[in-house]
Amino acid sequence: MPSKSSAEQVEDLWNCVNSHVQANQGTYLESTVGATNILRHWLAHLRTSISTKTADRLLDAAQGTIIEVAGCLSLGLVRPALFSMRVQLELTLAWIFFNDHPVEWRFAEKRSENYPMRAEILRYFARNSNRFPERFNLLTKRKKRKNEDPYGILSVHVHSLSGLSAPSVAPLASLVRPQSTCKECIDMQREVAEYLSDTLASWYADRWQDFPAEIIAALKGRMTPTELKRFCG
């Protein structure tokens, strides 16, 4: 049987995307909004209360990745959704660093280089805040996410080491993944949001009283009174 023409393959892809959209409609948009609720509260808080107006385009870009995740999963496209989640994590951490380093930001913007890697930023947190590791570990003990650090599993997907997202030699229509796989991505997005919330809360814990009520409620719901006292103390 002869292989399908390019036009036929594109039509098959369109039909699969259309079927996915019709079957799910706004489901993945709503699910992504729900999965990123705590992160969206954080992004708004960072802009209004913590930003030095140095690198806020990174916050805009991080917010943009939430839209990308919702859009990609609404079309059944898992691989680009996972890429966006990884970028979401990297952008948010980079903003924390550059927000307090305008000289380094101007150089990075001008030269498009010397962006600190995630591991370097985490070392920066530990070096410059004696309480950061303790606070982060306290929240990690009470985590709801399966993966302590979702960056690792996202990197596995991005580098095509996982069957979930590895490219395959298959018709174009295979790019549209099953609902079960898309739902797994929503779970991963929820994990990324919680991980970033824990990182931000641990770094900015000395500003606890300024945190929005939604963030405080979410954090309090995961700690005992004794742990909360240790976290804020």
Image (cartoon, rainbow, N blue to C red):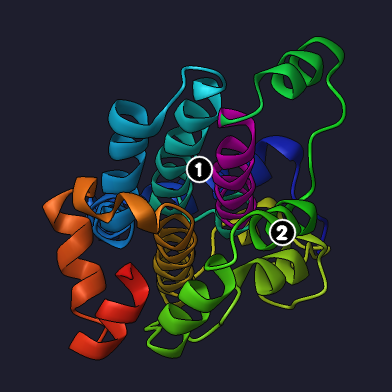
Q: Which mark is residue 147?
A: none
Most frequent secondary structure within the magenta stretch = helix
Which of the two residues, 226 or 71, is positioned nearer the viewer here? 226
Quarter residue 63 falls in: top left
Picture coordinates of residue 207, whole percent (x, y)? 32, 49
The kind of residue on which mark 2 rests is Arg
Dot 2: few (<14), some (14–19), or many (≥20) neighbours within 10 Å? Answer: few
Secondary element at tag 2:
helix
Instruction: Say whether residue 85 is magenta.
Output: yes
Quarter residue 230 falls in: bottom left
> Is 227 situated above or below 34?
below
x 37%, y 83%: residue? 144
Which of the two residues, 198 or 163, is positioned nearer the viewer here? 198
Instruction: Say whether residue 131 is magenta.
Output: no
Label 1: which residue?
A: 14
Q: Is residue 5 left or right of residue 154?
A: right
The magenta segment is: 82-99
Can residue 59 be seen here? The reply is: yes
Secondary element at tag 1:
helix
> Is 173 situated above or below 131?
above
Which of the two residues, 129 or 50, is positioned nearer the viewer here? 129
Quadrant containing the C terminus in the rendered view = bottom left
Can residue 224 be seen here? The reply is: no
Picture coordinates of residue 65, whole percent (x, y)? 49, 40
Contact (CB < 8 A) between labels 2 and 1?
A: no
Precedes in sequence: disc 2 or disc 1:
1
Count of residue discs: 2
Quadrant containing the N terminus in the rendered view = bottom right
The kind of residue on which mark 1 rests is Trp
Q: Which mark is residue 127?
A: 2
